[in-house]
Amino acid sequence: MPMKPQEPSEHRVPVRTIRDVAVALADGLVTPEWTSPPVIVGLASIDDEGFDLRVHPLTLPGESASEATHPAELLLVLDIPEDWLALGTVAYGWVAPLDDRQVRPSGHPDAERARIVEIMDRAGNETAVIQRVTGGQHVIEVAVDCGYDDRETGAVQDALRRALGLPTP
């Protein structure tokens, strides 16, 4: 049975594109600490002054940030409001160079802490931002017209698609 998200905190984001919202989130708009718990974000409405953003923690009542539920698990049981224009997550992890080492990113000698934002609109367009603690930022945009079969997907992207009622592989 779908769960209702915790009461959202509301933010006014004075930008006009989902890409700009994703970048603002990656810059720490709602989770400024590098140890913040992950959150689900919903873009509720847009007008000439920007987006209304709803922010829901990915922790259940009584959980600490270290006990937060993985976004892919919680997205599958949330009841997403029909009026949200887009849905996303802000989470933290490690990034490292792709090389021949067989270690998790956090175990790599060149690992960096990162804030990772993924937003998907109701049509299936995706914007992701990887913000390194050292300041480097990488923005990835994938338009729905590239064809879903051509996209690489992970657990979070699949869960976002399912939560929005979009097709999945």
Image (spheres, rainbow, N blue to C red):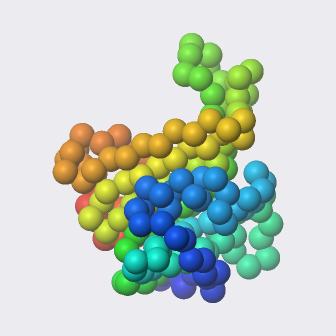
Specify the farthest residue to the top.
100
User: Looking at the rendering, which quadrant does residue 39 occupy?
Assistant: bottom right
User: Can you see residue 15?
Assistant: yes
Instruction: Left or right? Give the position of 146 relative to 121.
Output: left
- Tell me the residue at 24%/40% (across/down): 150
Q: Is residue 127 above or below residue 82?
A: above
Residue 88 in the image, given as x and y percentages of width and height = 49, 63
Q: In this view, does 111 lie above or below 120?
A: above
Residue 40 in the image, given as x and y percentages of width and height = 56, 68
Q: In this view, does 146 lie above or below 86?
A: above
User: Can you see residue 162?
Assistant: no
- Tell me the residue at 67%/57% (across/down): 28
User: Looking at the rendering, which quadrant does residue 62 occupy?
Assistant: bottom right
Residue 167 in the image, given as x and y percentages of width and height = 26, 61
Specify the farthest residue to the front.
48
- Tell me the residue at 19%/51% (across/down): 145
Instruction: Left or right? Give the position of 123 relative to 50.
Output: left
Instruction: Left or right? Give the position of 61 relative to 123.
Output: right
